Structure formats: structure tokens, C-alpha cells
Amino acid sequence: MQHNCYKDFAGEIPHLAEGPMEGDEHDFSALLLRVAQGDVHAQDQLCQQYEPKLRIVARVLLGPALRPYLDSMDLVQSVHRSMLIGFRDSKFDISSPEKLVALACTIVRRKIAKKWRRHRRQQRLGAQLPENVSLSQLINNLSSPESSPTDVAQYEDQVEQLCRCMNETEQRMLMMRLDGFSTAEVAEELGLHPVALRVRWSRLRQRLEDSGILSDLI
């Protein structure tokens, strides 16, 4: 059975397996309206609904390579800001507390991936990248689950298997992306048309998701 550390947090983390949060749909909609209108008390209430779960997710998703540079609580605060700005600008259409938590988790995943790519780009430009690091090692350093040794070993096996199944172009695409290269830089280096590269990225993300690996890596 495939072990997926990221798709279903409720199955991996007991705190996320709790039932629906209190309050009916009318109360929740009214809360969101007050948040959008700038009600500070309502904003605090909204953050309290997803923050405990978000803290857990942030800690789980921070791989060993990023933990020295990123603090989980800083990430949570960054998500708070993004959420409040999004509601203020009517960018989100959330109908339930459960979807609110899912949105917060998606945002934190993307922030972690973005921070990682920025960190790797800075290392690359400063010629500080470690030598002879394999693609599987890079992925594991970013996304290996903070779980039991058995789960970690199973996850690393999945990463190794995925990397073996990639062709040379796919491996170079992912390696460059994890090293902080932009999409334009990857396309130029590999001699690919941007449209063709976007199609390849889409397929590669799906393979990562199907393998239980953090697709926001790319």
C-alpha cells in the first residue's frame, strides 16, 4: 500500500482527524463577511479555527534541509497574512471550516516550496551548493516526513523508485527546479519551448502527487 505523507493529514496526524469545527454555515459565512470588512476580532476568530492544525502541518512539511532556516511559527504568521489579504480582496470562496483548513494547508505548502527554491537559488549564486547531491537526496532533504523510521524508509524508497522511472530530461528539469532555477532558465538550458515545458511540469507534478511526494516542490 502506498504511503502518502501529504495528501491526507487526517490519516497521519491524530489532531487532524477530529470532527467538524463548531458553528453552522450561517455563522461561518457571517464570520467571513466580518473578516472581509476588516473586523479585527473576527480575524482573530478565523485564525483560531485553523491555526492549531496549521502549526502541525508546517512542522511536518519542513524537511531537514529547511528547518535551520525556516521557523514553523513564522510560516504560520505568513499564512495568516495571506489569508486575511485574500479574504479582504475577495480572492477566496470558502463554504466551510474544513475547506478553510484545507486552504491554509495549501498555502503553507506553497510557501515552503517557494522558500526552498529561493534558498537553493541563493546557494547556487553564491557557489555554496554541496557537490554530488543526487536528485533523490534533494527531495528527501526537503520533504522527508518527520515520522517513524519505517515511514521514513518507505517514503525514501518511493522517492528512489520515482527518480529511477524518470527519463534524463525529467530528472534534469526537477534537479534544476530544486536548485532554484526559474522556469525560463530551465527551458533555455534544456532547449525546450515554454509551452512544452509547462506540459511536462504538469505531468511531472501529477506523478509526484501519485507517488505521495510534495508536488509543490516544482
Image: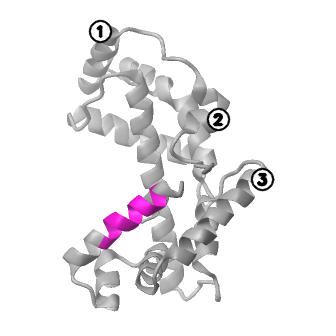
Boundaries of the magenta span: 200-209
Camera-side residue: 46 or 147? Answer: 147
Report which quarter residue 189 is drawn in: bottom left
Which residue appears at 77% of the width and 48% of the height?
148
Residue under label 3: 150
Residue of label 2: 13
The numbered mark at residue 26 is 1
The residue tagged with tag 1: helix, strand or loop? helix
Residue 49 image offset from top left, x and y in percent? 48, 23
Q: Is residue 28 left or right of residue 44?
A: left
Q: CA distance from mark 1 to mark 3?
A: 44 Å
Q: Mark 3 is on which residue type?
A: Thr
Nearer the camera: disc 1 or disc 3? 3
Do the CB atoms of the residues marked 1 and 3 lie less than 8 Å apart? Answer: no
Q: Position of residue 48 (x, y in %)?
A: 50, 24
Q: Earlier in the sequence, mark 1 or mark 2?
A: 2
> In terms of sequence position, does the residue under pointer 2 or pointer 3 come before the other?
2
Name the foreground residue: 7 vs 91: 7
Q: Amino acid at mark 2?
A: Ile
